Image: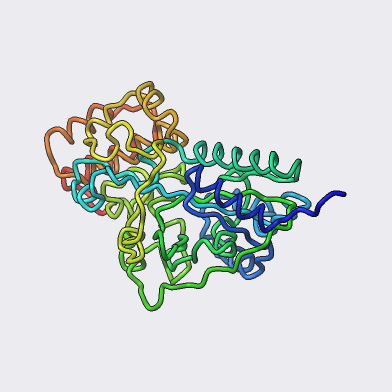
Amino acid sequence: MIQPLDLAAVKRELAARARALGFGRLGVARIEIPEDERHLLEWLNAGFHGDMHYMERHGHKRSRPRELVPGTVRVISVRMDYWPGEAREAGEALADRQAGYISRYALGRDYHKVLRKALARLAAAMAERIGPFGYRVCVDSAPVLEKALAREAGLGWIGKHTNLIARDAGSWFFLGEILTDLPLPADEAAGAHCGSCTACLSACPTAAIVAPYRLDARRCISYLTIESGGAIPAQLRAAVGNRIYGCDDCQLVCPWNKFARAASHPDFRVRERLDATRLTELFGWSEAQFEQRMRGSAIYRIGYERWSRNIAVALGNAPGTAAVIAALQRRRNDPSALVREHIEWALARQFGRGADGA
């Protein structure tokens, strides 16, 4: 006689295996998130997604996992810490305008590959335990409202800066999902604990957090330096400072990050001295050097042109030294019109002409 599957036991084994694979926590979510769907539609209708047209391309699939993967009844959500404990202190790096600041999540290897490999191993272990079942692994590879589902799985709440926060781990972690047809016992959704704190709103350099829980991506430095392929708006360039890939300011001031844990996965250690390299050195890289050094990094996907554009803006905001001026002038005839335009802005700013971007 075939014994019924003990799904509660399967879930406990999954959580144990997830910890062994380097995940900080695993939870299981139900798939109904109507309020988050409404919030997404309002956000899209406001145009806050900017050029991220993929956010509206999939209709309701992003907020209805069953439409994305037919048969889905649960989402297994996991988180993995990425804070690089050995990196240069973030505040010190931001204050050093001669060096480039890179978002802490991108200092190591590309997290997509790390998490996807670990999730695939987790799913394979589950299949070995219970036999074949329906599932799909997701790490930013499918239209999924991962933060809402992680909240429903009990992993944390969505803070006023729109990032997920956990009481025991802050917000310096990645998320990944397994969409499955297994009716595993679902966890209780996490409650919010931001209270009256608005530190993240005040800290945003470009005032991109226009209201609690409402982010205008078009003003966000992470969007401007990573997602946007065009010119960075002139009126926002000074506020970009030395941030050449992403921005962490809203997380750096979050009081819950006193509970953040340093990454245990070796792939999240700092590569290529990216936590402390001078802007002039980075701007001196050829395209071939960028390809060689950034392959395997999340930075690689923005390409050499955006990378150069971002550094040109940071050089415009850097202290006016002979080395900075020389680095900009050496690339004044760059093949990219986009890069040339940002170089001219930076030189004008350095020479005190049109410092407001005019």
Residue 66, horizontal then vertical, whole percent: 74, 55
Q: Looking at this view, name the residue that lies furthest to the front.
A: 1
Q: Is residue 244 left or right of residue 156?
A: left
The image quarter in which residue 206 lies:
bottom left
Residue 253, horizontal then vertical, whole percent: 30, 63
Considering depth in this image, is 164 or 25 the residue closer to the camera?
Answer: 25
Question: Residue 329, relative to residue 8: is it above or below?
Answer: above
Residue 56, horizontal then vertical, whole percent: 63, 54
Q: Is residue 306 visible?
A: no
Residue found 75% across the figure and 45% down from its top: 134
Residue 160, horizontal then vertical, whole percent: 43, 68
Considering depth in this image, is 20 or 69 the residue closer to the camera?
Answer: 20
Q: Is residue 58 left or right of residue 204?
A: right
Considering depth in this image, is 196 or 165 the residue closer to the camera?
Answer: 165
Q: Is residue 251 visible?
A: yes
Q: Looking at this view, name the residue that lies furthest to the top.
A: 288
**For the image shown, how many numbered marks are present on the structure?**
0
Q: Is residue 78 left or right of residue 107?
A: right
The image quarter in which residue 102 lies:
top left
Q: Looking at this view, name the residue that lies furthest to the bottom.
A: 196
Residue found 34% across the figure and 64% down from its top: 254
Residue found 65% across the figure and 50% down from its top: 57
The image quarter in which residue 117 lies:
top right
Q: Is residue 63 left or right of residue 71?
A: left
Q: How is the image coloured?
A: rainbow
Question: Residue 343, relative to residue 167: is it above or below?
Answer: above
Q: Looking at this view, name the residue that lies furthest to the right.
A: 1
